[in-house]
Image: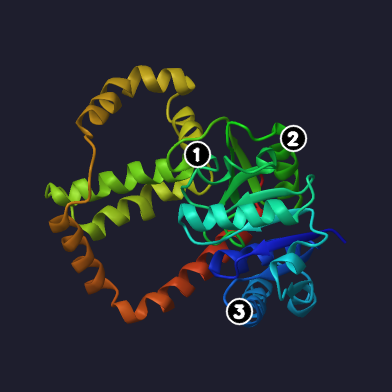
Amino acid sequence: MDKVAVVGAGLIGRAWAIVFARAGLAVSLWDKMDGVADRAMGLIGSSLSDLHAAGLVNEAPGKIAARVTPAATLADCVAGAIHVQENGPERVEPKREIFAELDRLCPAEVVLASSTSGIPASEFTADLPGRARCLVAHPVNPPSLVPLVELVGAPWTDPEAVTRTRALMARVGQVPVTAFKETRGFVLNRLQAALVAEAFRMVRDGVMSAEDVDACVRDGLGLRWSFMGPFETIDLNAPGGVADYVERFGPLMGGITEEQTPYHYDAPTVGQVAEERRAALPLEKIEERSAWRDRRLMALVAHKRGQPR
């Protein structure tokens, strides 16, 4: 049984442990904070029970959870691993420190991947002897429900390390996509940033309420986007495909983007949106609503699995 090391036992680390374990791999889980990896086991078991109830895992939750073992030390965690998935703090210095230690502990053939949401691998691997085997494998939260993983190497990352990581991610049921070069925030966050910024602008400029902007995505764009991306969407929105779409709507869409100046999250608009959201969902109910979101995601994933692509 191949072994994967998951470094960091927070929300993302626990979800990664589920991803690898449900695919039949042994998982070693370590966290620098005492007791965190041990406590994570209960949360992993609970999440697996939810996945089983939703029909997203066929094995007994306990059998899958048994493949995950908390490690006492980082050295124990990575010993014998074919892949390391790091899930530490979103700051450059801690990542430099942990990757230096991982590079020292792991054999040269082991890929070292970071789950960072926006820090390029070039910022924390430049000085490592084994920097060619380092890359970003950025998941969508939580990876146990949302399968996309962005693979982003540094300029010096060996293409073979990317190829092997892509194969591993496909093997464990994720959907890997590969960036040809580093960009600020990677691709998924850049797409999300454009939509979120425009949503704030619509509220700032008095065009629409936060609730109705959410409805535009939830009950409009999001329905199509749960099955296809923007290019396929526009390809189907004109009889002659993409070229026809651009001929018909290019001037309109291009004119809109000319109006979309950089948005810097001004305090009054942020406050207005926050006030609307707290009226709709008090802070003390966020955890409950997050659990509801995860159940809805489980139902959507189960539905999509049963549909032809």
Residue 262 falls left or right of residue 87: left
Residue ID for mark 3? 43
Question: Looking at the rendering, in which quadrant would you find the N terminus?
Answer: bottom right
Query: What percent of the width, then of the height, locates residue 103?
Result: 69, 51
Q: Is residue 173 visible?
A: no
What residue is rendered at 72% in x and 61% in y? 5
Q: 124 or 215, which is in the foreground?
A: 124
The tag on residue 229 is: 1
Question: Looking at the rendering, in which quadrant would you find the C terminus?
Answer: top right
Instruction: Please say if 207 is above or below 29.
Output: above
Q: Residues within 10 Å of mark 1 (few under 14, many from 20)?
A: few
Q: Is residue 43 visible?
A: yes
Q: Disc 1 vs disc 2: Cβ atoms closer than 8 Å? A: no
Marks 1/3: CA distance? 33 Å
Q: Secondary structure at mark 2?
A: helix
Marks 1/2: CA distance? 28 Å
User: In terms of sequence position, does the residue under pointer 3 or pointer 2 come before the other?
Assistant: 3
Marks 3/2: CA distance? 35 Å
Amino acid type for the residue under numbered disc 3: Leu
Residue ID for mark 2? 160
